[in-house]
Amino acid sequence: DGGITQSPKYLFRKEGQNVTLSCEQNLNHDAMYWYRQDPGQGLRLIYYSQIVNDFQKGDIAEGYSVSREKKESFPLTVTSAQKNPTAFYLCASSFGQADNSPLHFGNGTRLTVT
Amino acid sequence: GIQVEQSPPDLILQEGANSTLRCNFSDSVNNLQWFHQNPWGQLINLFYIPSGTKQNGRLSATTVATERYSLLYISSSQTTDSGVYFCAVNQGAQKLVFGQGTRLTINP
């Protein structure tokens, strides 16, 4: 079945440690995105990538980094510079650009940093 | 930037009732999408609807782009319809701007 796989589902880390969240898609979508969701809030864009080896910052990129070495994969690293990393992280993809293609999401990773 | 407002913020209904959720946006948009987030956090794309009306089973959506709003209709609600409904809009860039959501609770 085609879809977007995020792993792990739950992740616990100590403050000061970097952590990488995995996102893989087999939908042959060109564009991939990372969003952050805080309790009771909407989604905010962290980074997006339209093609391999290219990515752009979203609204809240500080303290995060990404790579897009393969079309299928778009990992997100939450660095120790991110002041409030505890959140629900959602990866998404679309066939074309976000302004003309439906967005599809993975099941998310809940990150807790203590 | 563009503002997206959803109403009501919370809605509690009995199973079988109908509901209308509203999304207002402050500027012209290229597209609008509706999503349902279930209690486990999974987000499902319900409609891609920059204008006009679409229907999918018990759900339908209408976007009136000239008046800057969209409506999501849910008929004959079921408990599985519970969750948070988000609308998101785009103005021509890669960034989708999400509203704060409407939390729908369907009681048996």
Image (cartoon, coloured by chain):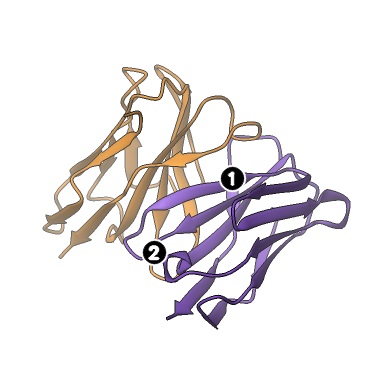
Chain colours: A orange, B purple
Residue found at x 31% / y 18%: A69
Side of A68 where A114 appears, left or right: left
Mark count: 2
The amino acid sitting under disc 2 is Asp
Question: Where in the figure is residue A50, as x and y percent of width and height?
Answer: 50, 24
- Tell me the residue that label 2 is attached to: A38
Circle 1 is placed at which residue position? B96
Chain holding disc 2: A
- Name the one closer to the observer, B92 or B34: B34
User: Residue B62 appears at what percent x and percent y?
Assistant: 75, 54
Q: What SS does tag 1 mark? A: strand
Q: How crowded is mark 2: few (under 14 residues within 10 Å), some or many (20 or more)?
A: few
- On the same chain, marks 2 and 1? The answer is no
In the visual, does A26 lie left or right of B30? left
For label 2, the SS is loop
The answer to whether residue A3 shows anywhere in this view is: yes
The quarter of the image holding the C terminus of chain B is: bottom left
Q: Residue furthest right?
A: B66
Q: In this view, does B52 lie above or below A3?
A: below
The span from disc 2 to disc 1 (Cα, nearest Å) is: 17 Å
Residue A102 placement (x, y as % from top left): 57, 37
Q: Determine the chain carrying the residue at label 1.
A: B
Q: In this view, does A2 lie to the left or right of B7?
A: left
Q: Which quadrant of the view contains residue A100?
A: top right
Q: B65 or A40: nearer the eye?
A: B65
User: Of A7 and B62, which appears nearest the observer?
Assistant: B62
The residue at 13%/57% (across/down) is: A12
Q: In this view, does A111 lie above or below A74?
A: below
* Residue appearing at x 46%, y 49% in the figure: B44
Q: What is the number of the mark on residue A53?
A: none
